[in-house]
Amino acid sequence: MASLAIRDVQLINEGEIRQVNVEVRDGIIWSIDPVNRRRIADRTLEGHGAYLLPGLVDDQVHFREPGLTHKGCIATESRAALRGGVTSYMEMPNTHPSTCDRSEWEWKMATAARDSAANYSFYMGANGHNLSNLLEADYKRIPGVKIFMGSSTGELLVDHPEILREVYCKMHTTHPGVPISLHCENDQVIAQAAIDYEAIKPRALWTAADHPRIRNHEGCYVSSRLARELAEACSADIHILHLTTKEEVADIVDYKKRVPAGPNGFRSITTEACVHHLWFDENDYERLGNRIKWNPAIKAAEDRKALLEAVREGWIDVVATDHAPHSAEEKNRPYTEAPSGGPLLQHSLLMMWDLALKGHFGFERVVQAMCHAPALRFGVHGRGFVREGYAADLVLLRNKPTVVREDDLEYRCGWSPVAGFTFSHEVYGVLLNGRLAYFEGRWVESGGAMPLAFDR
């Protein structure tokens, strides 16, 4: 592979911003030099002061293949990921069929080897009766186990405390350090909330604005608190996905204040926020309706404020997308029939960048939460940082407006909840394993995606 020099860029990496030149050889980062040192390379990209970031690592995406490919597939959604600067992803098991055994996991791996535009990995899903499959899995190739403690989509649901305890304890004994990622909502609380709310407002009149009244604060907090308490009792490693409430933030802050971090900077219980819960609040339902119907629900402005503060202060470890496309026809159905979830991968970095520009946190924190932290938490080998010897997964970002047009989306579903918005910056270049995959509005080199490896 030819050498490539990227010159005069502002590298944002490991808590600092500095002006550098970077040389890439044979798919890896060969050197990081002061800007006044210019090495000879076969090809040169002049950065002109643009930002250079590690490729993003998204720990929660739903690409819908197999079984739901009218919504999206590995090929289309991974292209959207790469356009947005997400060079590595961890895909969830709630497809049709679910990824709950080795054969289904191997099918996804083979499909990604053929079709994926970005580096790939796939979770193993728990369904309450496949513990042997979870314990026998190869977690040097699998990011971890996914448990749905609330029924959101698909057929996966594990909410009985004794089953959870058994999975926690046996995974900790057999595969210490492998995170169990959790969707935390309590079905019983949600069902009762729906009954109570119907007494106030007939179900036929419900709209997306009613979603946070039904999939409410209590439904999230009861579930995530149970997950945390069981994990502490079992000394298990868990990763609580998509926090949405101020109560959950307070609970995790209390936990982190009394439990010291380990050598890698993490505790055995870590958390994630998603970009849509940081960007939107319940005031946006009137304008966007089902397009921002997610599980867990987007909630009040005060919840959003608590999440943003927790990201800034590091109480929340990781920021991801929960990218979950549905067709426009599905989203246009009445509220009670419309599925939850939406596409965000192509613009997640730009959303976080604009939140940083508004003063919610610094650019360094964006890189920490979207690149470094997921790579470290899951033990991703040789990625998530700009370091000599690491894979050359790199993102070039510059101060040029990006207008979100639906005719310029890579998603199969063809729509976005941020359509029509103008972001302040542009992802104009992406390197994947040293190949210049995307540059200046066009695809350059295809192929080169690799399966993620995990250091365990």
Image: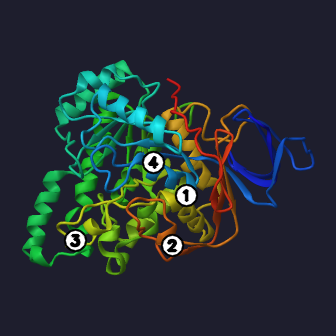
Residue named by callout 3: 333
Which SS class for mark 4?
helix
Q: Amino acid at mark 4?
A: Ala
Residue named by callout 4: 75
Q: Is residue 187 above or below residue 381?
A: below
Residue named by callout 2: 405
Q: Are marks 1 and 4 in contact (CB under 8 Å)?
A: no
Q: Residues within 10 Å of mark 3 (few under 14, many from 20)?
A: few
Q: Confirm whether residue 258 shows in the render.
A: yes
Nearer the viewer's eye, disc 1 or disc 3? Answer: 3
Q: CA distance from mark 1 to mark 2?
A: 30 Å
Where is residue 174 shown, x and y percent of the image?
35, 18
Q: Amino acid at mark 2?
A: Arg
Q: How many marks?
A: 4
Where is residue 109 shown, x and y percent of the image?
42, 33
Nearer the viewer's eye, disc 1 or disc 2? Answer: 2
